[in-house]
Amino acid sequence: MSLLEVKNLRIEYPSRFGTHTAVKNLSFNINRGEIVGVVGESGAGKSTVGNAIIDLLSPPGIIAGGDVFLDGDLISGKNIDQMRQIRGNKIGFIFQDPMTSLNPLFTVEQQLLETIHANLKMSNSEAVARAISLMEQVGIPEPELRIKQYPHQFSGGMRQRVVIAIALSGEPDLIIADEPTTALDVSIQDQILTLIRNLCIEKQVGCMLVTHDMGVVSNVTDRVAVMYRGDLVEFGETAQVLGEPAHEYTRSLISAVPRSDRKLGRFPLVSYIEEAHELEKLDIKTHWLGQSEDQREYTGPLLNVENVSLRFTTKDSFFESKREYVQANKNISFSINEGETFGLVGESGSGKSTVARVIAGLYPPNEGKITFEGIDLTALKSEKQRRPIRRQMQMVFQNPYTSMNPRMKIYDIIAEPIRFHKLAASEQQIQQIVFDLLDHVGLGKMAGVKYPHEFSGGQRQRISIARALATRPRLLICDEPTSALDVSVQAQILNLLKDLQDELNLTMLFISHDLPVIRQVCDRIGVMRQGELLEVSESEKLFTNPQHEYSQHLISLMPEFKGLRTAI
Amino acid sequence: MSNTDTKMLTRWEKVKESDFIYHFKRDKVAMVSFALFLAFFLAALFAPLLSPTNPYDLMAIDIMDSELPPSWMDEGDSRFLLGTDDQGRDILSTILYGSRLSLTIGFLAVAVQLILGTIIGLSAGYFGGRVDSFLMRFADVQLSFSTMMVAIIVSAIFKASFGAEFFSEYAVIMLVVIIGVAEWPQYARTIRASVLAEKQKEYVEAAQVMGFRAGRIMFRHILPNCLSPILVISTVQVANAIMSEAALSFLGLGLPVDQPSLGALISIGFKYIFSGAWWITIFPGVVLVSLVLVINLLGDWLRDLFNPKLYKG
């Protein structure tokens, strides 16, 4: 008999606009000592399943049908007191963000002891001994010392270990891990997953691992359930599902994962994922978009960054000697040629976004020179002089949920820069341009009358791109344009960018922390760490033969995911 | 909301379908408050039509009618439903005319606060640095004096320098300016805080990258997104302004005796409350308290509605 048996589970969210069915008729099971992965894009209902099993659905969600059995015992529909006996004691839960899932006002010891006393009957000294041994099991060094510390004294990875220790403290039979490594760096992700893997085998505990990361699934799970919009589309052995997927959706999901081993022209098979209209081919040569009046006589590199440094003041003082700074960019130099895609890669806090903002003119640099088509931008005195150049450089931002004014309609968002820079002769022409742009990024004319909140993240990123194109730019700065999106949507956005670049001969500065994505998109790549540019090299050369020590380290950490076994 | 629902809604249908109306219809407190507020507002607006006598018309007042109790009491007069004050004015009519003055001063004073506070708060939040430090220290200094103190000092100075007659002629405008100037830091602080939050969002950076001017970004992009706190604070401030006006009038620094507002009426009646003429104070007092109460309840309801963290069924 399997440890957890979910039969025909149906979860509904009633609202005044009708009932939204988050999970439809889901059935799967988990055995002891086994890790079952649940994958799917955001909104597929994977986290909802985990919450429903321990009866912690956020209101107004309800279990509308189906049964959940734990060890043959029906646990769905139990009352609050009976459920409390099961939580912690039978089922442990690991949350996504270790930064917020521990109470910052209590020591780790207090939080561990609280859970132990709630679930097991034992004296205080026994409980302390158990807490220390748990800390030891999850691999925290010097547990006797560290148990007295507060959560803020632990790093992200160590905190997640503490969360795992708490989840284990009631000797559960089943662990539900909801995106346990999403908030962590790649190197720590590996350690945490290995830890969960080993604990499951040692203690013969079943584990449900909710994740959106196909790399994680392929590395640690035994079986995998693929969810799509509340439906279970495929469930089986991991190697089988990932290697030879039976369902169309699984195939397109897997093919959307950027490959780390070689560069593909485009991502294939992504049409299943989000209903975007087919790109309507425009005759760019005759269309407004292609008729830029900007002179193209200059032959040097389009953008040249020379010895740029920027520091932020962290402590201001009247006296120069007492001021404190943090150096965001140190002496950065690179150049981008016309029509090229230049990538900047580095961990969070490495200053790559700051470089983009300096180039876009959002922060003035403290030192150095930036030339755009031979014009020295740092020498420009006023905003007025800069304005014609601003039009030629546009930016696509990371977070599609905050990068558009929520109180403006899409039509006005795209039309505003055209009107402001007086790029069109008449209101009629503006309307034509906006509709063409919306069609061109795959949204359709009807999108114009809606507000940003009516669109999904991927669709919003398309709007962002349309807005950036509305000024007919020559340089497009993409600051992590896909890091807030699902892999499948990411693949579509990257395809779109690639198509636009080919058509319009755009030059791109592409910033990402994701090495496989950078590899798929960029011609040349710069590696950054702590505000310094360590290495600039051709894309293929960087991945096959990295020169700098840090680049080698980054590339060795890159998760390996080879994609479908059979070539498409 | 689903994307398949692409049928066009008219503006009115959109309003009817909005969360605002939906939650309003399900909240009895909000509905009752709004109904009462509307009743007060309409009564004040149509005071000349509704009131049985005109309390401002000195010819119609007869000193012989002074201090008559409400009509249902023994010595009451059927002409004066709620009795008369010390000068023989009908209390009901005076309340209607008085609430007209109170509401006018309340709304106009808030408009003054709103304009001053929005411009100052928006500039402080958007430009930051020295501008921010200067404007906000200025606001802090003003906040360190109590509103009443500022209002009393300013109106006393006005009264002394322009003479009581000039002051009473322009009393409404004076009160609007005094209360408006005394309370703008409330707005400036709230707006500055939400501007700082909005400024972090990337749409502001996107507008900057487009090359838009500061004024355009401030008023067209940032301000519309700060509207909900402004709306909430406005309801509270209207109530506060009405209270301030009443307090100033009570202290004899507000409206002149021949144009009594609610506060002035309470003040007049206060002298007679121990000689048995309670109605002069109690009726305007009840109106003032319920008016302020319903405005505050509406404000609370709005604040909860705009707080996305509260789950609203």
Image (tube, coloured by chain):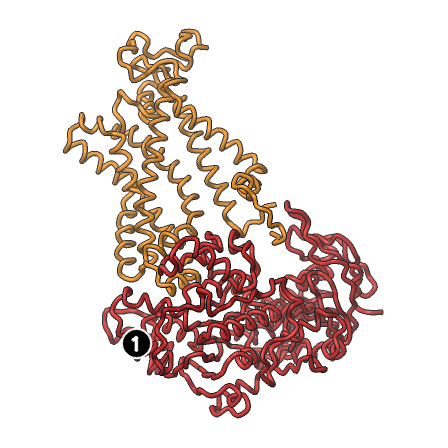
Chain colours: A red, B orange
Judged from this view, the residue extending furthest toward the right is A1
Give neighbour class at mark 1: few <14, some 14-19, many 20+ (Cα, 10 Å): some
The image shows residue A190, relative to residue A44, as above or below, that is below
Q: Locate residue B305 relative to residue B239 in the image: left or right.
A: right
Disc 1 marks which amino acid? Ile
The residue nearer to you, when weighing B313 against B80, is B313
The image shows residue A513, relative to residue A402, as above or below, that is below
- Which residue appears at 53% of the width and 33% of the height? B31
- Which residue appears at 46% of the width and 26% of the height? B39
Measured from the top left, where is residue B278 in percent x and y?
Answer: 38, 18
Q: What is the total number of numbered labels drawn onto the structure image?
A: 1
Instruction: Name the secondary structure under disc 1.
Output: strand
Measured from the top left, where is residue B141 in percent x and y?
Answer: 26, 50
Q: In terms of image quadrants, where is residue A198?
A: bottom right
Q: Is residue B92 visible?
A: no
- Which residue appears at 43% of the width and 7% of the height? B74
The residue nearer to you, when weighing B307 against A527, is A527
Measured from the top left, where is residue A445 in percent x and y?
Answer: 54, 56
Q: Disc 1 is attached to a residue of which chain?
A: A
Q: Locate residue A194 relative to residue B108 in the image: left or right.
A: right
Q: Locate residue B198 relative to residue A107 in the image: left or right.
A: left
Residue hosting label 1: A375
Q: In terms of image quadrants, where is residue B235?
A: top left
The residue nearer to you, when weighing A195 against B130, is B130
The residue nearer to you, when weighing A85 against A236, is A236
Q: Is residue B68 visible?
A: yes
Measured from the top left, where is residue B25 in percent x and y?
Answer: 57, 36
Judged from this view, the residue extending furthest toward the front is A286
The image shows residue B24, relative to residue A417, as above or below, that is above
- Which residue appears at 28% of the width and 9% of the height? B63
Q: Locate residue B65 relative to residue A174 in the image: left or right.
A: left
Image quadrant for the C terminus of chain B?
top right
